[in-house]
Image: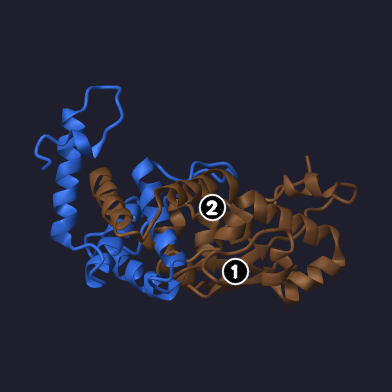
Amino acid sequence: MSRYEGRLPVGADGLDAPVFAEPWQAEAFAIVVALHERGLFTWAEWAERLSSEVKRPEAATDGSDYYERWLAALERLMADKGLAGHDEVDAMAAAWERAAHATPHGKPIALENDPERN
Amino acid sequence: MAARVRALETILTKKGLIDPAAIDVIVDTYETKVGPRNGAAVVAKAWSDRDYADWLKRDATAAIASLGFTGRQGEHMQAVFNTDDTHNLVVCTLCSCYPWSVLGLPPVWYKAPPYRSRAVIDPRGVIEEFGVTLPADKKIRVWDSTAELRYLVVPQRPEGTDGLSEAQLADLVTRDSMIGTGLAKGAA
């Protein structure tokens, strides 16, 4: 069975269903909207990027990894435009992870808490 | 994922390309303000007001904007009206183009590969999976959305709703009925 067959992940038809499953999805979504409004790319350019990500063979057949694909498209677009390189994002993400571990429970995570920060 | 998004946000903020406060506003807008209730208001107005329905048919972008719902991507809107003869179904075969300003963000199934391909090949079968069986002689038209042009289905007004106000009518309009995978709810 190809990934384009199979039953649809039909869910509730509520008018008030939650839009994002996790906060990072909302942030990734908003970053793209904000960068587009700033004129860094056209929406057609974005749609093309997103399309090629969701068509990758490893993409989930039920659309459940949509925002992972969205983020991958954003990262590639930023790297191609020279706005945020892959290594730069890796390093900053690692700094955030270290800061999160070093922050006491219940306190807001701040990049300043990264023990390797210089 | 969370750390990578935060990393991107930090880098882009440092470069002055985004403003974290503006990001919060966008999130809040899509989480709480923009959603299918907007589309339901458009449909209910079209059901109640013939002039508005004509305007919506001719120039959906302007007719929808007149209610305060405008797109952020400069996209054009087209309203497609269900009739006794024809049912309309909307898909985005490319990715997930969707009329955000009136429906909010798309449901998971709209973005999933089976819907994106099968809506075109077997629209009747897809609609049946949503629990809707259309008469065999009803024609189904499938509209493929793009980044520039998005579609809103105007479902048929249910029978026995003559005395209802616009607000009461809006309650009968479901999200799926405005994509074409459902029908408006019957009057209670």
Residue beneath the point at 70% across and 60% down: B155
The figure's colour scheme reads by chain
The quadrant holding residue A24 is: top left
Per the image, label 1 sits on a secondary structure element best described as: strand
Residue B5 vertical placement versus B113 (above, below): above
Q: Closest to the observer: A4 or B111?
A: B111
* Of labels 1 and 2, the one closer to you: 1
Chain colored brown: B
Labels 1 and 2: the sequence-earlier one: 2
Q: Amino acid at mark 1?
A: Tyr
From the viewer's perspective, tell me whether residue B180 is left or right of residue B20.
right
Left or right relative to A77: residue B134: right
Crowd band around label 1 with a 10 angstrom C-alpha radius: few (<14), some (14–19), many (20+): many
Res B86 visible:
no
Residue B151's disc number: 1
Residue B130 disc label: 2
Q: Which mark is residue A91?
A: none
| Quadrant in the picture for the C terminus of chain B | top right
Q: Is residue B74 above or below residue B178?
A: below
Which chain has been coloured blue in this picture?
A
Residue B6 makes an appearance in the image: yes
Q: Residue at x 58, y 56 (%)?
A: B103
Q: Residue at x 26, y 60 (%)?
A: A72
Considering depth in this image, is A17 or A44 the residue closer to the camera?
A: A44
Looking at this view, is A67 or B17 the one in front? Answer: B17
> Measuring 80% from the left and 72% from the top, which residue is drawn there?
B54
Does residue A42 sit above or below A34 in this rendering?
below
What amino acid type is highlighted by mark number 2? Phe
